[in-house]
Image (cartoon, helix red, strand yellow):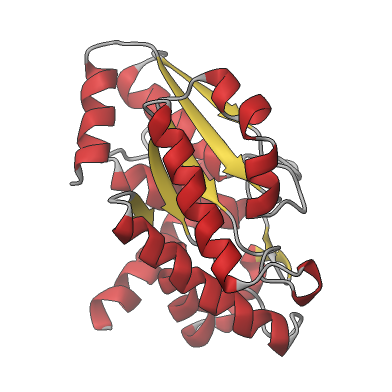
Amino acid sequence: MSSIIKNFIERLSTEKRTRILAFGSSNTERRISGMNWFDCFELAVKEKYGRFHTCINTGIGGDTSRGLLERFETDAALYKPHLAFITIGGNDSSPDRDIDATEFRANLKELHRRFAAINCNVIFQTYYSPNPDICSAEHLKIFYHYTDIVRETATETNSELIDHLLRWERLRKNYHDVYINLMRDGFHVEANGNKVMGLDIARRFGINLNKTDPDSWTEALAIQNLMDELENKA
């Protein structure tokens, strides 16, 4: 368990008010009915530690790393978060956005620097697996390169990394029908896709999400277990 997660757990365990921020684009924004991944994480923390935290979601569809920097003061620093999830890169990697790899890497590092300056720890996240049957090959090529930049930046800045893409890629390639049912379109997940992400994030913090109302998690848990099996075979 990383020091970032240990410090977060210690803070909650001592009942200190903790603010958690989700900062990103449409992957973060609440945009469909049902819980998104950040809602799942909020519920998990509440179930284990009680209401000693505030979750703030400032995801905006269509945003880029450039946009996150532009609205940092109003949509991040204003809330003085103690922990921030950054999930970005899908729009940066779109060929028509004109954000090259050098700028993307610099933007991620600047975001980390700004969060560190306000004493906020960062968790970088990769995306789920985009659907290659819908997304353009050009976009996907850049997307996978930018995902590597996210991973590298997390390592270079000693940040936490939750690498959803690795697990989702195995699922897409081995159980395509299961994968398709989790996707809303080429670059967005349905409610169960959000639940699978939420389960993985919660588990990273040592929290199980199926203690309350277990029936609502049955399908997502089955998919998480399938991903675990694929990971163990890899």
Counting every numbered tag in the picture gives 0
Q: Quadrant of the C terminus?
A: bottom left
Q: Which of 160 and 153 lies nearest the eye of the viewer? A: 153
Which residue sits at x=70%, y=89%? Answer: 137
Q: Is residue 33 left or right of residue 36?
A: right
Q: Where residue 101 sits in the image (x, y, percent)? A: 57, 72
Which residue sits at x=58%, y=26%? Answer: 56
Quadrant assignment, res 225? bottom left
Q: Where residue 157 sits in the image (x, y, percent)? A: 33, 52
Q: Which of 121 and 18 lies nearest the eye of the viewer? A: 121
Against 64, residue 13 (above or below) is: above
Q: Where residue 188 sits in the image (x, y, percent)? A: 69, 61
Against 55, residue 15 (above or below) is: above
Q: Residue furthest right?
A: 96
* Residue 165 visible in the picture: no
Against 9, residue 183 (above or below) is: below
Q: Is residue 215 left or right of residue 18?
A: right
Q: Where residue 174 sits in the image (x, y, percent)? A: 47, 86
Against 108, residue 179 (above or below) is: below
Which residue sits at x=55%, y=25%? Answer: 77
Which residue sits at x=47%, y=28%? Answer: 20
* Residue 147 visible in the picture: yes
Q: Is residue 28 left or right of residue 215?
A: right
Q: Which of 91 and 72 lies nearest the eye of the viewer? A: 72
